[in-house]
Image (spheres, coloured by chain):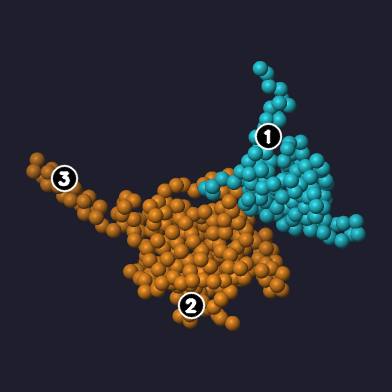
């Protein structure tokens, strides 16, 4: 009899201890704290895919990419994200060499504020992704995002994109059927990682990932961004070329 | 009392006209006239409060003119089966419009016939100018 009570007591103690460890199942009020200001320390104009190599393009995807690159080169196609500071779209916005801020507010939402072109991504945390019929009338540059926490990771699904954005600064493209999943988490006390999975079967033969790592910089304050003007000093960001 | 079909249609048109006037005036279009315009799509703008077809049309002298044809909002179009890529750049289409009264190159959308013969829009109903723009999801 004593033995049973002792074992029950130990089991109860173990459960209580496990519940207080980070990474254990959490309610909405114990979501991981990923709020803060983040800034990449390197910039890649050409998106670097996990596993290396070139983008796994379909024939249609390659034709579209080649046409876009040629148009950008001869001036018949405009990079509106750069010329008019229209939103970058995904995954291009993740490559930003400017700081951004993650705000875990208001309730039911995570808000990501980018200094570059004043972009704001609203991640809805308390409603499911709208269905395709609901998304069709509202193709957004940065898509519609819904998210949830899995342990220490913020998982963000995005769909409902328009076709006006590039995948990266070289002009790689996507269709409006693009769907992405990001897994965002702290990988050290001062670093945040965003691994994005890109799904767009018309242009890419398979889903592929890109990984972005940012330094937490709560000493930095987001500044104005006015299209066409010179902005903050990016000399600390490797890979940024200023003409 | 039995409501006739014509009576019901009259009521429906009157009900639609009220919100339309609240948005913008359709007096700029000649609702008595229907004009057929054939051309090549330069752009299909899927935007609020009105979507637009920008059409390149050959005139009598063989020169290209740009026409702008106004449709409803994406929400209203989507309910009728439209998607952003229903019309794409380069498509050769035939449209029927209520032309602008001032004679400039544009009008209010009535129907479009796609290259495969599909017709979008209904030539027999009164033009529904109500943008019907609801909140984004």
For the residues labelled 3 and 2, the Cα–Cα distance comes to: 61 Å
Nearest the camera: A206 or B22? Answer: B22
N-terminal-most mark, 3 or 2: 3
Find out whether the residues at labels 3 and 2 contact each other: C-beta distance under 8 Å. Answer: no
Q: Residue at x 65, y 61 (%)?
A: A61
| Quadrant of residue A143 within the rendered picture | bottom right
Quadrant containing the C terminus of chain A in the rendered view: bottom right
Query: Of helix, strand and loop, which one carries label 3?
Result: helix
Q: Is residue B103 left or right of residue A61?
A: right
Look at discs 3 and 2 and give the one toward the viewer.
2
| Label 3, residues with CA under 10 Å away: few <14, some 14-19, many ≥20 | few
Residue A46: % across, % down: 57, 72
Find out whether the residues at labels 3 and 1 contact each other: C-beta distance under 8 Å. Answer: no
Q: Which residue is mark 1?
A: B14
The chain letter corresponding to orange is A
Residue at the right extreme, as displayed: B61
Q: Residue at x 31, y 57 (%)?
A: A23
Task: Identify the subunit bearing mark 2.
Answer: A
Query: Of helix, strand and loop, which one carries label 1?
Result: helix
The chain letter corresponding to cyan is B
Residue A103: % across, % down: 40, 61
Residue A214 in view of the camera:
no
| Label 1, residues with CA under 10 Å away: few <14, some 14-19, many ≥20 | few
Q: Residue at x 82, y 59 (%)?
A: B65
Q: Is residue A106 left or right of residue A20?
A: right
Indicate whether A177 appears above or below A131: below
Query: Of helix, strand and loop, which one carries label 2?
Result: loop
Circle number at residue A232: 2
Residue B105: % across, % down: 80, 55
For the residues labelled 3 and 1, the Cα–Cα distance comes to: 75 Å
Residue B103: % across, % down: 82, 52
Indicate whether B105 appears above or below B23: below
């Amino acid at each position: 009899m004593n033995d049973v009570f002792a074992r029950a007591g130990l089991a109860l103690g173990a459960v209580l201890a496990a519940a207080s460890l980070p990474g254990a199942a959490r309610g909405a009020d114990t979501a991981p704290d990923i709020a803060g200001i983040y800034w990449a320390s390197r910039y890649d104009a050409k998106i670097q895919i996990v596993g290396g190599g070139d983008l796994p393009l379909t024939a249609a995807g390659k034709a579209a990419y080649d046409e876009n690159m040629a148009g950008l080169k001869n001036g018949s196609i405009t990079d509106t994200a750069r010329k008019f500071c229209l939103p970058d779209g995904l995954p291009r916005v993740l490559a930003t060499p400017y700081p951004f801020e993650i705000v875990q507010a208001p309730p039911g939402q995570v808000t990501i504020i980018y200094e570059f072109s004043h972009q704001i991504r609203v991640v809805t945390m308390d409603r499911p992704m709208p269905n395709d019929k609901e998304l069709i009338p509202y193709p957004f540059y940065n898509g519609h995002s819904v998210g949830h926490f899995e342990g220490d990771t913020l998982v963000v699904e995005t769909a409902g994109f328009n076709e006006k954005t590039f995948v990266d600064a070289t002009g790689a493209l996507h269709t409006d059927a693009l769907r992405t999943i990001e897994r965002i988490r702290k990988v050290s006390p001062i670093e945040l990682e965003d691994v994005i999975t890109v799904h767009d079967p018309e242009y890419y033969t398979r889903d592929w990932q890109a990984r972005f790592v940012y330094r937490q910089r709560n000493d930095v304050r987001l500044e104005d961004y006015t299209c066409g003007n010179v902005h903050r000093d990016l000399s600390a960001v490797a890979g940024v070329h200023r003409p | 009392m039995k409501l006739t079909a014509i009576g019901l249609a009259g009521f429906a048109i009157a009900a639609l006209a009220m919100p339309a006037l609240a948005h913008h005036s359709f007096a700029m279009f000649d609702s008595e006239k229907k004009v057929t315009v054939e051309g090549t799509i330069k752009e299909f703008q899927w935007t609020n409060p009105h979507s637009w077809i920008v059409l390149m049309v050959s005139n009598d002298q063989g020169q290209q003119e740009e026409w702008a044809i106004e449709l409803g909002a994406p929400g209203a179009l989507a309910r009728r089966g439209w998607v952003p890529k229903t019309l794409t750049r380069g498509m050769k289409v035939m449209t029927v419009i209520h032309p602008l009264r001032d004679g400039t190159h544009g009008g209010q959308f009535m129907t479009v016939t796609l290259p495969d013969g599909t017709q979008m829009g209904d030539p027999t109903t009164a033009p529904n100018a109500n943008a019907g723009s609801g909140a984004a999801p």
